[in-house]
Image (spheres, rainbow, N blue to C red):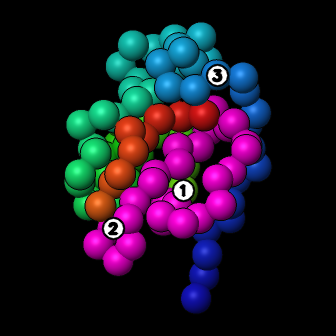
Amino acid sequence: MSRVPYPPCNGCTCTGNRCRIEFPDPNIKLEWPELVGVNEKVAKAKIESTNPFVTVVVLYDGFIPLTDVCCNRVYLFANHPNGVVTKVPQIG
């Protein structure tokens, strides 16, 4: 099984729409509130299609919260085993 390399964290001090300075193009999305309640695979595809500069990392309920703030990652919180998004996905 081949795995896609996990990109290094592009550290930043902002999250969500507060990171607009990092992504000045208004067509690049930074938050996806409409994805709460959506299946994780559908949400992941939507995020990656609307912001090609990020990697989506799925985290399931009970996972120890991460302290990394990365402008090139979106942490997608989902419940398990249903894989439904539980928090608003955002960069950072």
Closer to the camera, 17 or 36? 36
* Other residues around mark 1 within 10 Å, as few (<14) / some (14–19) / many (≥20): few
Task: Residue type at mark 1: give it.
Answer: Val
Tell me the SS state at disc 1: strand
Report which residue position mark 2 lands on.
Answer: 83
Q: Look at the image and tell me whether residue 45 can be seen.
A: no
Looking at the image, tell me whether mark 2 or mark 3 is earlier in sequence order. Answer: 3
Work out which quarter of the rendered image holds the N terminus and state it: bottom right
Instruction: Give the distance between the C-alpha atoms of the residues marked 2 and 1, in whole angstroms.
Output: 13 Å
- Nearest the eye: 90 or 25: 90
- Determine which of the numbered discs, if any, sits on residue 14 in the image: 3
Work out how far the residue at label 1 is from the one at label 3, CA to CA, in angstroms.
18 Å
Q: How far apart are labels 2 and 3 at the CA level?
A: 27 Å
Please indicate whether residue 41 sits to the left or right of residue 18 in the image. Answer: left
Q: Position of residue 73 (x, y in %)?
A: 59, 43
Query: What residue is rendered at 39% in x and 73% in y?
Result: 80
| Above or below: residue 71 compared with residue 61 | above
Give the SS element for disc 3. loop
What x and y, as percent, mark residue 92? 60, 34
Q: Which residues are magenta?
A: 58-83
- The residue depicted at 23 percent of the width and 51 percent of the height is 37
Q: Position of residue 52 (x, y in %)?
A: 47, 39
Q: Which comes before the other along the chain, label 1 or label 3?
A: 3
Instruction: Evaluate whether residue 21 shows in this view.
Output: yes
Q: Quadrant of residue 23?
A: top right
> Who's the residue at 54% across and 66% down the image?
62
Question: Which of the two discs, 2 and 1, sits closer to the camera?
Answer: 2
Q: State the residue position of label 1.
A: 57
